[in-house]
Image (spheres, rainbow, N blue to C red):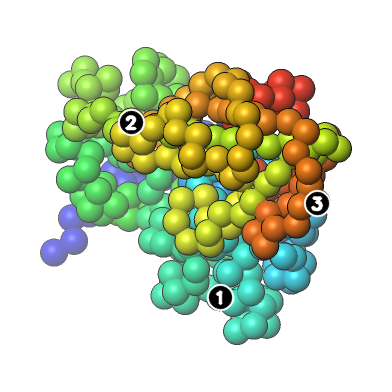
């Protein structure tokens, strides 16, 4: 039997939140505002998709400029399909998690080839596309196509955990959180509701010191009623990231050009440009036998870079006045053109350690 009181409570949650969203929504380059939607403007699935892929593991603040630059380069799915993978990497460089860039290109190719450049609208077809998992498929379906799917990111997890007082470790509560989110997602304006939950989590129901007094759902929040908002969601203790060590080589030719090479397509930073380097657990930071060229290598300093699952400490060495030769997997490039290469942040850090003016914004 349907619990009408339960449904009424959920309907009130969505109604209150949408009323707040109509007044307080964030203005973001990939979004359609409530006013625009009311006038008949529909969200662009391409923009929604690109934004959601970029936002995985990356802040809104960091994504804004990348999104604008990406869209100016490839304004639609067909344009992206015609781009080279290297060009996509170059625009993506610095955003991290580079498998996302590879999946974007593969997904664009598949949509153009199999769907006549139009995004499929069923959740099953969306999930079958490269790089689109449960969350991204739900986000596209809800935001771009107005389908009532539960969209659950880290902000939503926090809001739902507090709203319904879920006292289970977050890692084990995913299914329950999704179930609650599905229950409160309205059939009318599900995309706006999903974005409203994200906005609420990022601006009011924050990880530390949530501003409960101005929350549009403070009369519905069980955690607030029990004075436990800052204790939720429950999180497992963080484990210390393993440390990997290694060595990197900045080779400078007699013409002042830097030697770069391409990483293997598969694996960490696959397909990106790099300077010669080697790192692993307990790897040597002084083994010059790993250098790409024989000669006198001068120590420039160390860099630290934090990846998702480990921390990397590398010693950087440089040698100058090399004679330029052609290599199968390498090339020489002017130092003032390094910013045009698909170099991940860790490689930019290493280059900046040896060539301080190469990337003025890079921090060690």
Q: Secondary structure at mark 3?
A: helix
**Residue 43 x/y as whole percent:** 65, 58
Q: Is residue 228 left or right of residue 89?
A: left
Q: In percent of the image, x 70 and y 70: which residue is there?
A: 81
Q: CA distance from mark 2 to mark 1?
A: 43 Å
Mark number for residue 109?
none
Residue at which label 3 appears: 72
Q: Earlier in the sequence, mark 2 or mark 1?
A: 1
Q: Earlier in the sequence, mark 3 or mark 2?
A: 3
Q: CA distance from mark 3 to mark 2?
A: 39 Å
Q: Nearer the viewer, residue 284 or 32?
A: 284
Q: Secondary structure at mark 1?
A: loop
Q: Nearer the viewer, mark 3 or mark 1?
A: 3
Q: Nearer the viewer, mark 3 or mark 2?
A: 2
Q: In percent of the image, x 43 and y 69: which residue is there?
A: 127
Q: In percent of the image, x 76 and y 22: which residue is there?
A: 357
Labels in figure, total: 3
Residue at which label 2 appears: 243
Q: Is residue 192 above or below residue 352?
A: below
Query: Which quarter of the figure is the C terminus placed in?
Result: top right
- Residue 333 appears in the figure: yes
**Residue 44 x/y as whole percent:** 67, 60
Q: Earlier in the sequence, mark 3 or mark 1?
A: 3
Query: Which quarter of the figure is the N terminus placed in?
Result: bottom left
Q: Nearer the viewer, residue 78 or 238?
A: 238
Q: Is residue 122 above or below residue 289?
A: below
Residue at which label 1 appears: 120
Q: In percent of the image, x 71 and y 25: which residue is there?
A: 355
Q: Is residue 70 left or right of residue 115?
A: right
Q: Residues within 10 Å of mark 2 (few under 14, many from 20)?
A: some
Q: Residues within 10 Å of mark 3 (few under 14, many from 20)?
A: few
Asked if the residue under mark 1 is in contact with the one under mark 2, i.e. CB atoms within 8 Å, the reply is no
């Amino acid at each position: 039997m349907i619990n009408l009181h339960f449904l009424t409570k959920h309907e009130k949650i969505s109604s209150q939140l949408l009323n707040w969203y109509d007044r307080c929504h964030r203005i973001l380059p990939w979004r359609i505002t409530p006013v625009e939607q009311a006038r008949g403007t529909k969200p662009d699935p391409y923009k929604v998709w690109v934004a959601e892929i970029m936002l995985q593991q990356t802040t809104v603040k960091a994504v804004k400029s990348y999104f604008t630059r990406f869209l100016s380069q490839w304004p639609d799915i067909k344009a992206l399909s015609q781009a080279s993978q290297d060009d996509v990497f170059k625009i993506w460089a610095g955003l991290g998690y580079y498998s996302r860039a590879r999946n974007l290109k593969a997904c664009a190719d598949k949509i153009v080839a199999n769907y006549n450049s139009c995004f499929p609208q069923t959740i099953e077809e969306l999930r079958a596309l490269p790089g689109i998992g449960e969350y991204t498929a739900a986000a596209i379906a809800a935001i771009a196509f107005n389908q009532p799917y539960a969209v659950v990111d880290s902000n939503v997890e926090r809001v739902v955990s507090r709203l319904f007082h879920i006292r289970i470790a977050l890692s084990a509560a995913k299914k329950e959180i999704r179930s609650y989110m599905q229950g409160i997602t309205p059939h009318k304006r599900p995309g706006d509701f999903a974005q409203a939950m994200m906005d609420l989590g990022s601006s009011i129901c924050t990880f530390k010191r949530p501003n409960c007094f101005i929350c549009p759902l403070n009369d519905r929040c069980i955690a607030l009623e029990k004075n436990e908002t800052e204790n939720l969601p429950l999180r497992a203790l963080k484990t210390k990231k393993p440390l990997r060590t290694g060595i990197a080589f900045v080779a400078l030719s007699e013409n002042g050009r830097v030697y770069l090479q391409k990483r293997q397509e598969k694996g960490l930073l696959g397909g990106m440009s790099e300077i010669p380097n080697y790192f692993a657990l307990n790897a040597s930071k002084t083994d010059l036998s790993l250098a790409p060229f024989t000669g006198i290598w001068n120590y420039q300093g160390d860099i630290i870079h934090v990846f998702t699952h480990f921390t990397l400490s590398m010693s950087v060495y440089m040698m100058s006045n090399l004679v330029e030769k052609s290599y199968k997997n390498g090339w020489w490039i002017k130092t003032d053109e390094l910013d045009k290469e698909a170099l991940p942040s860790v490689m930019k850090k290493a280059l900046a350690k040896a060539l301080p003016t190469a990337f003025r914004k890079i921090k060690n």
